[in-house]
Image (spheres, rainbow, N blue to C red):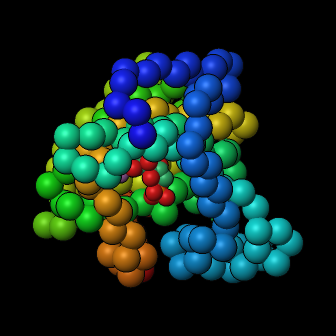
């Protein structure tokens, strides 16, 4: 890889990058066990393994001193009353942070630490979110019809630990309630 400064564009109205080295698509089947309403989950899956979110990555060497950048697009939709969301993860190197900038749509970032602290921050266009080291993070699209599009950047050696969240889930869930977006405890 040539080490020379480079630029790329975020192309609006979609907010997608002009340069993409890797395009990841995650479907309903990738989040088995994560949604509260398991009947609604299975009923949806029986009809179609629908696309929940996509990630457009710009590749760099996964070394300290490098940063990884990309765009995350969470599509609108719900499983039962629960909004579409990413798998969510801790960084494998726990002491690494991440910065998200919301480009488009409405959503929240659900976060927690291994010690049990929790935080939920709203995302809307122009909002910048700093996720400190040690905080697991999951993006949730709360828009009715619009994608949640965020630009992220994090240390390239961070890695992903998905297993902890797959086993325990997050402590908070984001549901569509009679008065709008509801943040509830995950009792399961
Ligand atoms: O590094 C990040 O936090 C993001 O790039 C996420 O990977 C992206 O939003 C997709 O979420 P997940 O990796 O939890 O599937
Ligand atoms: Ni991350």
Q: Nearer the viewer, residue 163 or 148?
A: 163
The answer to whether residue 120 is visible is no
Please identify the quadrant where the N terminus is shown. Answer: top left
The outermost residue toward the front is 2
Q: Nearer the viewer, residue 79 or 75?
A: 75
Give x and y (percent) for residue 51. 71, 57
Q: Is residue 71 above or below residue 125?
A: below
Q: Is residue 44 above or below residue 108?
A: below
Q: Is residue 129 above or below residue 7?
A: below
Give x and y (percent) for residue 74. 59, 46
Residue name at image x 68 percent, y 19 percent: 13
Give x and y (percent) for residue 31. 57, 70
Residue name at image x 56 percent, y 34 percent: 149
Residue name at image x 76 percent, y 61 percent: 50
Residue name at image x 67 percent, y 67 percent: 28
* Number of callouts: 0
- Residue 165 left/right relative to 63: right
- Residue 134 left/right relative to 104: left
In which quadrant of the rendered view does residue 158 lie?
Answer: bottom left
The answer to whether residue 31 is visible is yes
Please identify the quadrant where the C terminus is shown. Answer: bottom left
In which quadrant of the rendered view does residue 46 lie?
Answer: bottom right
Give x and y (percent) for residue 78. 66, 56
Q: Nearer the viewer, residue 167 or 107?
A: 167
């Amino acid at each position: 890889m040539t080490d020379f400064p480079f630029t790329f564009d975020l192309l609006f109205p979609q907010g997608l990058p002009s340069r993409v080295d890797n395009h990841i698509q995650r479907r309903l089947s990738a989040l088995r066990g994560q949604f509260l309403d398991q009947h609604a989950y299975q009923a949806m899956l029986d009809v179609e393994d629908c696309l929940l979110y996509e990630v457009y990555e710009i590749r760099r060497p996964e070394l300290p001193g490098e940063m990884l950048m990309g765009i995350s697009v969470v599509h609108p939709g719900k499983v039962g009353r629960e909004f579409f969301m990413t798998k969510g993860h801790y960084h494998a190197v726990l002491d690494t942070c991440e910065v998200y900038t919301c480009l488009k749509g409405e959503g929240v970032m659900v976060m927690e630490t291994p010690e049990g602290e929790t935080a939920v921050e709203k995302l809307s266009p122009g909002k910048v979110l700093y996720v400190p080291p040690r905080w697991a993070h999951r993006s949730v699209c709360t828009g009715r019809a619009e994608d949640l599009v965020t630009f992220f950047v994090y240390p390239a050696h961070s890695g992903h630990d998905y297993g902890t969240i797959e086993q325990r889930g997050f402590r908070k869930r984001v549901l569509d309630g009679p008065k709008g977006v509801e943040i509830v405890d995950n009792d399961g």
